[in-house]
Amino acid sequence: MDKKIRVIMYGFIFLLQLSLALGVQAQSYEYQVLPDAIIFSIPVPSAHGFRVWQTKNPMKVIIDLEEQYIGQKGRIDIRDGALAAIRIDRGPETISTRIVLDFNYVLPDVQWIYEEGRLKVTVNKVFVRQTLHTVTQGVRYGHERRGIEAGPLIVNFLAVDLNDPLVSVKSLVALDQIYGQELVSSMAQRGEAIAAVNGLYFAADGRPLGLLAIDGRVLSEPYAMRTAIGLGPGRASIGQVGFSGTVFAPDGHSYSISGVNRPRGVDELILYSPDHGGTTRTNQHGIDLVVVDNQVQRIGYGQMAIPLDGWVVSGHGRARDFLRGISEGDTLNWEFKLEPDLISQGYDTIIGGGPRLVRDGQIYINGESEQFQRDILVGRAPRTALGLTASNTLLLVTVNGRQPGISVGMTLDELARLMLELGAVDAMNLDGGGSTTMVIRDRVLNLPSDGVERPVSNALIVITPESRR
């Protein structure tokens, strides 16, 4: 054998023996960052030559090895929502090598297996841990810690038995008026509720945006046939709701009603009820007719007082021209109904929202047809939703969000899948983001993304015999 080749071979054998004597080779460990798990594996000569343990606060998985690990010591940063880094160094005292997996949040207990001289450590990122408690008669509370590929989630939900005649679900508006904002916890106290969640979308001035009916009175009309829930004694129904309305003048002419209790737009005819507040808040560019018992009592131009036992019919542009043909003392009739007419069907509380999430047990998200903007449809956020089960149970659900390492929030598709998992056969989205709030017994159960509870326009409240005391 050539002398040069023999020198190379002897050198290789020497290095191999040296590495075996000192410990495990650098290139022999492996790790995988998968959508549902972190897997780390390393050769270990003896089944008794290692220890795997973990800490929860902060979340770390620690692997102690008797063998000295030969390789580059230090930190490997990982671009993953769950795993932050892998650190390799000499351990304390008799521990030759310590490997630390640093995580960004708490995950389920580490799992490991040793076979054929190799240690395999697995930490699952996708998981569900649920607790369920009875709050009071007809009401249960569930809390979930979840893990998804995007990160951790905190879910709270109420299961309200609508079959119980002593349990009811109603809506309240902030400060008992159209314009205003109030904490969900405050509305729960005022309504003598055992629990509550935030409800419908609202404008910056607190005005509800979309369908809202309380005690059979329509406070705000539907928009874009968006999804709403009707609640009545012992039952509920979820579906898209529109409306139609017409005012009839004494001479036989008519004009379509544009809306209820909201700012008047170009050529619009708006009805104002006492729920709107003391006055119409209209300007002088239209005409206002004060109507009591279908008789025109007074005609004015802007900022008209709304009678407690009547309405104001207000018009601008073409609607103003139509109303100008009506005099004081004339009889003024109108009709206004929801489509479908949930009120005549016995649903006295109706609250809109959307988009729909589940229909007949299948995911059905119709956000574009309901004309929602991308800030609602796209991305993950704190969410509030409600659903109905086959057993006539109402689910009120909140998902924390915008809190890295605690709860990242959900997309609408993820929210729909959550509602199915909780048993909903029909479900819809409500206002979310910083408005998302759940209250039980005067305590806010979720973690609002603003850091504090946000005042909102309206709430859904759960009333039971205990809360009526």
Image (tube, rainbow, N blue to C red):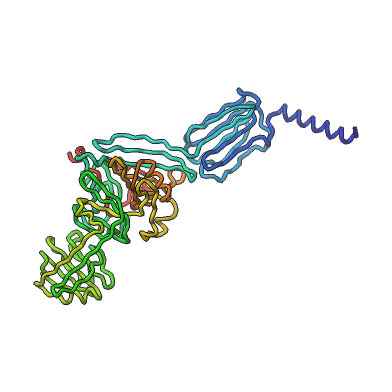
Q: Nearer the viewer, residue 458 or 92?
A: 458
* Residue 113 locus on image (x, y percent): 57, 28
Is any part of residue 445 visible from this angle?
yes
315 versus 51 height, above or below: below
Q: Quadrant of the C terminus?
A: top left
211 versus 90 height, above or below: below
322 versus 112 height, above or below: below
Q: Residue at x 24, y 75 (%)?
A: 318
Relative to residue 464, is residue 140 drawn left or right?
right
Relative to residue 441, is residue 151 drawn left or right?
right
Q: Quadrant of residue 398?
A: top left
Q: Quadrant of the N terminus?
A: top right
Q: Residue at x 31, y 56 (%)?
A: 240
* Residue 335 locus on image (x, y percent): 18, 64
Q: Residue at x 10, y 72 (%)?
A: 330
Is any part of residue 93 visible from this angle?
no
* Residue 416 locus on image (x, y percent): 39, 47
Q: Residue at x 50, y 39 (%)?
A: 125
